[in-house]
Amino acid sequence: MNKRPVLFEPFRIKSVEQMPITSSEDRKKWIQEAGYNVFGLTAQQVTIDLLTDSGTGAMSDQQWAEMIRADESYAGSRSFLELEQTVKDITGMPFVIPVHQGRAAEHLLFSELVEKDQLIPSNGHFDTTLANIEDRGAEGVNLLHADGKQPFTDSPFKGDIDLSALELLFNTEQSRIPFVMVSVTNNASGGQPVSLKNIRATSELCRKYQKPLIIDACRFAENAFFIKKRESEYATYSVKEIALELFSLCDGMTFSGKKDALSNIGGLVCIRDKALAEKIKNRLIIYEGFPTYGGLAGYSLAAMSQGLKEVLDERYLEYRLRTTEWMVEKLIQASIPVLRPAGGHAIYIDSKEFFPHIPQHHLPGITLTTSLYTIGGVRCCELGTVAFGKTLPGEQDGEDGQRSPELDVVRLALPRRTYTEAHMGYVVECLIELYSQRNECHGFRFCEEAPVMRHFRSTFTPVK
Ligand SMILES: *Cc1c(COP(=O)(O)O)cnc(C)c1O
């Protein structure tokens, strides 16, 4: 199916959901009422929602069937035992602990392992991971490989960690490092994959310096399929074999079931060390629930277990990764500055290249998210000056007082199995239409600036 001019969704539709179809007059009014922040829109005001791929996917008939079959027992539920077996088969981890979502896994693990003033190196911490590290009074250190910092160059594993930077950090700060994290795929750098070669070398370095390696495994199946396609030694391996190999190199993992478990909620923390697993389970009881349900209904454990089996289907993964690749090809043809090569779960557009006439402190990412919404009812997420920048002390309203990140992007994340090629083609058309009108667009400044995670709750005013 690869490289066909059309996409081939390897599923057919059994149940449909009406899409909100709206007029551009209404959208102009609604986005203004939302303070020009797409997070302030209601879902009913959005036609195609690409805000996130987290928990927004469609479940299969098999998942729904397993949910009806689920066992809601408090202790020792069959649904837990089935999930535990599925996870052991994929990860080889002896201790499998369910939690309500990925950040709960981070909270529990870090409560045991992270102390004040420590450093946690990574190829790229996700925002909740970083927030949980900082909540412990420690610091996350991103050591992304140089290739990953180049938005427009093709390179197969732009999610890799910089091994020499990691070794240098071990040499200078060994006593402050409790463990190393590797995020697959690297959500913070465009959903780019990490090679098995890089994970193996990271694992060897960790052994040398006697530090555990923890994998943030949210998109492990997408990453494994990238490895199959791009790392020639693994071309004949199944995705499941690659996953097993990958997990064999680490000491533990955190996982959000809202991504590659094809579920709407759920998460896991898995660990090799028995004593640590015991400590986590004791804390789990205080914060999440008994260790055989971890804050989830039995039916959510069942949905995750079945989803984890389905996500290993290589026809699904082929279609999934081909979708982002197909969109990126179309956008490159239209000269739109899109990050390349395509990542797994999302496409990323460089907003300051898209609107070269809008200075970064006038928030070109807000121009892109709001005008894409007004043109086509498509919702996506700013990950640039608003999300990762800062207002400098003594300055106001973003005029010249914004410190902007190097990469100012907007992310269009694709929910799993939810939209068709026609929908994605429509999104591409909306982007092309917007690009042709880009010179008529204007910037924004902060109206009310939220104190943390500014992209969620700030509001904006047009700069005309
Ligand atoms: C989503 C995500 C998390 C957090 O998971 P939640 O289920 O949203 O709490 C952690 N790491 C990465 C890489 C993620 O994408």
Image (cartoon, rainbow, N blue to C red):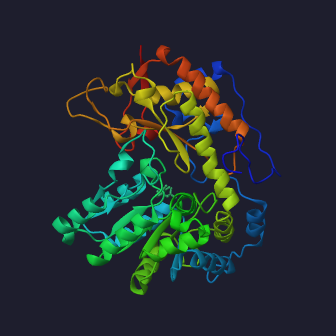
- Above or below — where is 397 with respect to 454? above
Indicate the position of residue 298 as horizontal and vertical percent values.
66, 71
The one of 117 and 323 positioned closer to us in this rendering: 323
- Residue 57 in view (yes/no): no
Question: Hey, which quadrant is residue 10 in on the image?
Answer: bottom right
Residue for point 71% across, 57% down: 59
Q: Residue furthest front?
A: 232
Quarter of the figure that contains the C terminus: top left
Numbered-mark total: 0
Residue for point 31% across, 26% down: 397
Indicate the position of residue 53 as horizontal and vertical percent values.
58, 49
**365 relative to 48 in the view: left or right:** left
**253 relative to 71 in the view: left or right:** left
- Above or below — where is 334 with respect to 51? above
- Above or below — where is 463 with respect to 176? above
- Residue 156 in view (yes/no): yes
Indicate the position of residue 18 as horizontal and vertical percent values.
77, 39
Q: Residue furthest right?
A: 14
The one of 183 and 106 positioned closer to us in this rendering: 183
The one of 396 and 218 positioned closer to us in this rendering: 218
Residue for point 77% across, 44% down: 17
**2 relative to 95 in the view: left or right:** right
Q: Residue furthest bottom?
A: 274
Residue for point 23% across, 28% down: 395
Indicate the position of residue 455 as horizontal and vertical percent values.
43, 39
